[in-house]
Every structure is written in structure tokens, then in C-alpha cells.
Image (cartoon, coloured by chain):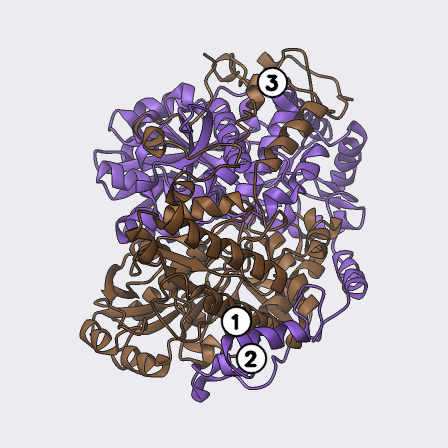
Amino acid sequence: MKHRYLPMTDSDQKEMLEAIGVNTIDDLFSDIPESVRFQGEYNIKPAKTEPALMKELMLLSQKNADLKTNTSFLGAGVYDHYMPVIVDHVLSRSEFYTAYTPYQPEISQGELQAIFEFQTMISELTGMDVANSSMYDGGTALAEAAMLATGHTKRKKVLISSTVHPESKAVVQTYAKGQYIDVVEIPNKDGLTDMSALKDMIGDDIAAVVVQYPNFFGRVEPLAELEEVIHAHKSLFVVSSNPLSLGVLTPPGKFGADIVAGDAQVFGIPTAFGGPHCGYFAVTKKLMRKVPGRLVGQTVDENGQRGFVLTLQAREQHIRRDKATSNICSNQALNALAASVAMTALGRKGVKQMAIDNIQKAHYAKEQFKKAGFDITFEGSSFNEFIIKCNRPVREVNQALLKKNIIGGYDLGRDYNELAHHMLIAVTELRTKEEIDTFVAEMGDYRA
Amino acid sequence: MHNENQALIFELSKPGRIGYSLPEMDIPEVELSDLLPAEYIRQEDADLPEVSELDIMRHYTALSKRNHGVDSGFYPLGSCTMKYNPKVNENVARFNGFAHLHPLQDESSVQGAMELLYDLQEHLIEITGMDEVTLQPAAGAHGEWTGLMMIRAYHEANGDFNRTKVIVPDSAHGTNPASATVAGFETLTVKSNDQGLVDLEDLKRVVGDDTAALMLTNPNTLGLFEENILEMAEIVHGAGGKLYYDGANLNAVLSKARPGDMGFDVVHLNLHKTFTGPHGGGGPGSGPVGVKEDLIPYLPKPILVKTDEGYTFNYDRPHSIGRVKPYYGNFGINVRAYTYIRSMGPDGLKAVTENAVLNANYMMRKLAPAFDLPYDKHCKHEFVLSGRRQKKLGVRTLDIAKRLLDFGYHPPTIYFPLNVEECMMIEPTETESKETLDSFIDAMLQIAKEAEENPEVVQEAPHTTVIGRLDETLAARKPVLRYQKD
């Protein structure tokens, strides 16, 4: 068997077997009892050559309608944004992508420093003291936030707003079950967390209240008012946030959030059919030693030269084992690098500009829909998403739009019974006036 | 030592420089204050860098040069399977029709992606010998937790609420007990015997009617095949527990033994190890979970099914443990793993394991004279050495690891597993040539000699890296976790 990934020659193998003192490779497997020995070869597809496989998979990929050759108005937590081309060039430096967790800091300073920079940028955007090196995604990051809060407060109940991303809510519920945590949903009113319901539900038994900013409907939750109610009961204030929106919105840290978590997919990470994206996790200094996952810290070597290491590892699974409060090991380091490069390319001015462009273009689209006779459901301040009502199931509308190379918005009826036929529309900086106008015109037939 | 500092990107920043090219604003704009309440408009900009595109490229190129990956040199980090990451995988994952799909698009517009996932599931079912596979978990530890949550749901569905204990061997990876805790279990440890295998008598002692599961890697973290696996399965199953397979070491047994045939009920795989999704400096990974028939109802939502009309995600799963991750797992990594499996085929995967095991045994025998070999028998894809002998000379395993840096190698995993003193865990993988193995062996033998003749050179290593040993105590005592302008 010859393969380009397998360098051993027959004579190599012969020499090596002699050195080991066995006759055949099979002798090395003599410790696997016959009763569990797999005989023969797997019944899987035969190997393909590189060109043949490339062609097959290229054709397979072309069966999909991608966001780059179609025009997308779909968001709902995953967004089609400007990805500076340089991001992928940095990511393709294989010193980064073929390395593992930087266990040996002397030969991993590149990765460690890049993560230290990522932590700094996330802290800046969220207005928090400390950010970790990344989590799997926004959903599991939020679940880890709920677990941190229950451990920290010694309370076993968490309130989560119904305006949090439905898939994140579902993930929080699954983790909560594992930890015997009770998660109760706060209803929404006019597309925002229902403040009076929250006041009724909160008490000294609540570990944390989880809200999203901007929320799943695109609306800007009133963090100032929420904070007052939540902290009056010494519950932790957990905010899930789209970090791009924080280029223009006052960061949750300014409103007293204890934990800010979310996904950095908006910065240079392809949508990739839902993953891998890049969860982030930021906290106040007080909670620093309870953060899940890896943290990079600055220190010095024996000559006093600045360097970076994994730090505060006493929190982590490989030290604490069954006493650990999180089991995360691998994270999304490479995607944190992608987000760092994108945040660097955009920089101070660009992140703000891109966030403003999103608000402006979404606002323009909203106005065009109004002119076309649509009502905007939950009218009010929003970031880059808003809701309209259709005269038929959103799925049918989207299938019709696909024929015009448009990927329509999200079907809210999937998660909210009261919002059947409602479409959540995302308009990012990438959408042109012409694309928006065409979309609004195409939607004319489906006005409720 | 070179002692050159690489400035932080923030230190390279200069107001007025930009590194972006945002789309034009071709619509009429309105005042921001008309769109947002004043209190919610950010007053102070996030202090991100202001640099040109070339500044960015030079910065990250400089950082990459300060990083060792598999493409830089040999990386025998035990238990991590640091094999070559094929470049074709990277190209395929970047195809427009894979990289730029939205997870919430209408299913009719993503049939190609779903076909790939379904076929990957089919391949993994055959490779593991299980009955069904979910591709949702994002990494190995996430897969462990998912599998344990399913085992819990299974027991609870049987009205069995007293199965609160998960048993792990003393050689287990730290994620095993941590995942058990997060899934709501308590952990019990079962001892290894003097052969490095699970002690059957001790296993009999710890199992009982409170046993939810036994978690095991096979081969174990010492690189040894648990020969009594069927007896162990009988003991655990006999007590009503389930057997969990940690797939971290699957590279050792491809086409040789399947977890499903060894009696395992649940399996997780690390696609970033055995199946070459790159390690990415710490992730993203992918941790699919396979199960036997009786656990299928508890799989996380949604499951991918094939119907006459095409592929669809099924959410109607009343017994499911629920969602473990938004959307459908780390698709991009799954695409890479699929590309790899299709590049290897059945005979290729068999050769992978055979060469991985050959390489490990060859190195083990060549190094045995100079270091202590705690378990003198054929290993599988990795083996452990003990630095006991060198420790008596004042040279610790940590010193040996640091000295290896001077030779251009990433050191083995050290001080793990915990049950071997001054442990070095070496996994060469199948993609390394005999010449590479021989050079590494020479370096290790030289270091062993240095430990005897000139221990300072080892104790004071590394001598050639861009930075010396770092003060980790300072980092933990006075944490500096972000850049601050003076």
C-alpha cells in the first residue's frame, strides 16, 4: 500500500521490524484477542486520487446554494459579513493551524500572543475586564455562563429571556439538566424581555438572568433597566451579545453585566453551515478565577523578557478532574485567530463603521418595506434585523425566493407559535441598495 | 537565545491608519440619534489597533515564526495524534458551496452538504461498529458529555435514578471525570494493575447497582491494549452499566478492532486527531458520538435522515437529550475529516494504523536502553517512558522536554498519565519517516548522555528558542490577561 501521506518504504519496514524483534506488523497486534479482532477491511468507499476527489466534492458543493453567489437576508445568529481577504492568508500559515494547544510556551509564543491579543480585543468590545481564549460557540458559551453563575451564587435557578436565540436557549436547557439547574423562560412583550414578568419572577433564589443584546428579534434590550432589577437580588447579569453590534452600541460592561458571552463569527469567520464558529466569554475581574476554558497571561522569562503562557490552569479539567466546573479542553483557537485578524483589519474605525453601516442599511430596508405597505412587527430600536409578516408560511416564501437567487429571512414560526408567517430579516453591510430594493419588490406578493 | 520581542499589535497601532475596505454606503443615511436612544450609543470607541494591511501580514507572519506546528517539525505529543494535516482538506473546506452556507437555509438548498454529512456518518458507523452516529459535538470533551448525558437519559427512562457513578481508570484523561461531573455524575476511579491494564478485581469492587458507566480508552493512555475488554464489558453490563469508549486513541486500532465489537455502547471520536481535522492551535475540533441501538432514542436533536425526497433534519425526537450545540456541529471540520477518509479508503486506513503502531514500537525499542520502560510489551500507537533514571541525576522530565526544543522538536506529552513517575508519552504517528524517527531517537539518546555527563545543559534548556523558561507563578499570582496602555 503506497500513499502520499505514508512515507514508510518496504525496506524501512523490514529494518524496523528487525529492530523490534518481530517478523510481521501483525505480530504487533497479537495483544488484541481474536474475539474482538476485526477481520478484513472496512466496507467503505475506496480511496480516490486527489484530482478525482476534488472534482467529486466540488460538484457536491455546487448542489448547495451558497451565500456568495446568492443574495442573503438570513441572519438569526449567523451572518454574511465582509471578511477581509487577509484573514484567510494569515489562517493559512500552517505554523498556526498545524499546532496544538500551546503547552510548550517557548515554541508557541506566536499562538499565545495572538490569543492574548484576542482576549484584549474582546475585553475592549464588551467593556469587560477579562476575556478567555474562546469557547465552542455562542450557545455553549451561554450554557457555561449559566453553570458559572449557579456555582458562584450557590443558587440553582436561572431565568432566560424568550428573546435569546432559540438554539442557544435549547443548549442552555440541556446543560442545565446535566447540572440539575432549573431554567425558566421570561416571556417577551413587544419583542423585548417583559420587564414586569421579570420583576415577578426574580427573587433571591435566582442565580442569573440571561438576556441577549441585540436580542433574537434584532431589538436593543434596555440593559440599564434590566441591570437594576437583576442586581437588586444579587443575581448575576448575563448578556449574550453580537460583538459587531458593540462597535456602535454601548457595551454591556458599561451597564454592569457580570458575564458577556456570544459568538465572534461576525469577524472573519465563514458561516460554514453552522460551524466551526467562535464562542467568546468575558467577565468582571471578580469572576476571573471561575472562567471556563483557557486563559493566556503575560509574564517574563528568566532574563526578564516579556512572554505569554497559559495561566490560572488550576480552574481546568486536566488539573481539577472531577472537581472542575467545566470540561472544555479543545476550544476554537484558530477561529479566535481569524476573529483577531478581522478585528485588527477593521480596527478602531472599521468596527464602528461596519456596525453603523449595518444599522443604516437595515433601517433603509425597513423603510422600504414600510413604503411597500408592510408593517414592521415590534417597531423600535434595532441593530441589523427586523421582522415582517407574510401572507403564507415563510418556508414557502423562501422556496420561491430561492428561484430568484435570494436566500430569504428566518421563519420565526419554527420557535414562536405566535409568530407564524413572520420573517426575521437580516441586512448586513454587504447588501447593496439594488439588492435590498429587489428583495422588497420580490416580497410584494407575500405581504400579509 | 535570540531574545527578540515581537511587539503587540496594539503597540504597532497609529491613529489614522486603516486595514479595511468596507462596501460603499449607497443608501441615504439618517442620524444615528434617530435610530438609537442616546444611552445606547457607544461613546468611547473600542480601542482596537489602527494598522495597514502590510502591518497586519508582517505581524502575524512574525508570530507564526514563533510557533511550532506539525509542518514545522516532528510533534510526538502523546494522545494528541499530531499527524500531517493534508492540504486538500483545507481546499475542499473552502469551496464556496461548503464554506459559505447558512445553517438555517431551506433544506432544499443545502442537499449537497447534508449528503456529505450523511455519508460521513455512514463511514463512521462502519469504522466504529456502532449503529448510529451524531456529528453534533464540537470536540472530544463535548462528545464525552453528550454521550454521558445519553447514558443518563437511558437509565432514567428505565426508572433507574440511582445510577449516579461513572468509573474511570486512574490513567484517564482529565476530561473524563470533568465530563462526568458536568453530566451530573460522581466519579469513581478503578486502579491499573502492574501490567498497566485495568485491574479486573478492582473493577468488580467498584461496580454496582449505582454504576452508570465505565469510561475507557482502548488502547489506554499508556498505549496498551486492554486485552480483557470483553470481561470488563461483561462485568459492567452485568451490573447494568454502560461502556463508554473515549476515541482519543482510535488511530491505534483502525481496521484492527472496532469499539462496537468490543462491547462499547457509546463512542466519541476526535476527528481532529485520527481524521486530520487540523488541531488549529487548540481547536476547533469535532467530536462525533456513535451509539448502539438501545441508545438511539436519546441522540441529541436534530438527527439527519435520508428520505425518498432527500435529506432532512428530524426534530421530532421525544426522548432526545435535547440540543448540545446550535446548528449541526463543526461542519468545516467534518468536511476535512470526510475528505481524509475518502483519500485513504479502507486499505489506506488499515495502513495508517499499521504504520502508526510500527513507528511507536520501533521508537520504544530504540529508546528503552536509555530510559525506563515501565511496561515492557508491544505498545500500540504510543508508549510511555519514565524519566526516573534521569531524575536521580538531577534532570527532570520537564528538563528533557525543554532540551528537545533545542533540537527543533515539540516534546512528548509529559507528566501524563498520572500513574507513571516522570512520565513521557510519545506518539510518533504514521506520517513520519524513518529518518525523522531516527533523528529524534538520536536526540533523546544524546540528552540521556548529557544527563549523565553534563546535566546543566539539560537543566538550563532551552538554549535556542526565542524566549527562555517563563515564570508561570508570576503569571498566576499577578494575572495580566489583556494589554493595557501604560
**Residue A91 placement: quadrant:** top right
**Pointer 2 and pointer 1 on the same chain:** no
Name the amino acid, label 3.
Answer: Leu
The residue tagged 3 is B12
Name the amino acid, label 1.
Answer: Val
- Rendered residue at 51%/83% (across/down): A27
Name the amino acid, label 2.
Answer: Ile
Q: Which chain is purple?
A: A
The residue tagged 2 is A25
Question: What is the secondary structure assignment of the residue under circle 2?
Answer: helix
Real-space Cα separation, disc 2 to disc 1, in angstroms: 8 Å
The numbered mark 2 sits on a residue in which chain? A
Question: What is the secondary structure assignment of the residue under circle 3?
Answer: helix
CB of mark 2 within 8 Å of CB of mark 1? Answer: yes
Q: Nearer the viewer, residue A427 or A369?
A: A427
Q: Residue A109: where, in percent of width, then height?
A: 52, 35
Quick check: can you spot residue B322?
A: no
Q: Which numbered marker is on residue B357?
A: 1
Q: Is residue A78 above or below residue B10?
A: below
Count residues near mark 2 (Cα–Cα under 10 Å), then give few for <14, some for 14-19, many for 20+. some
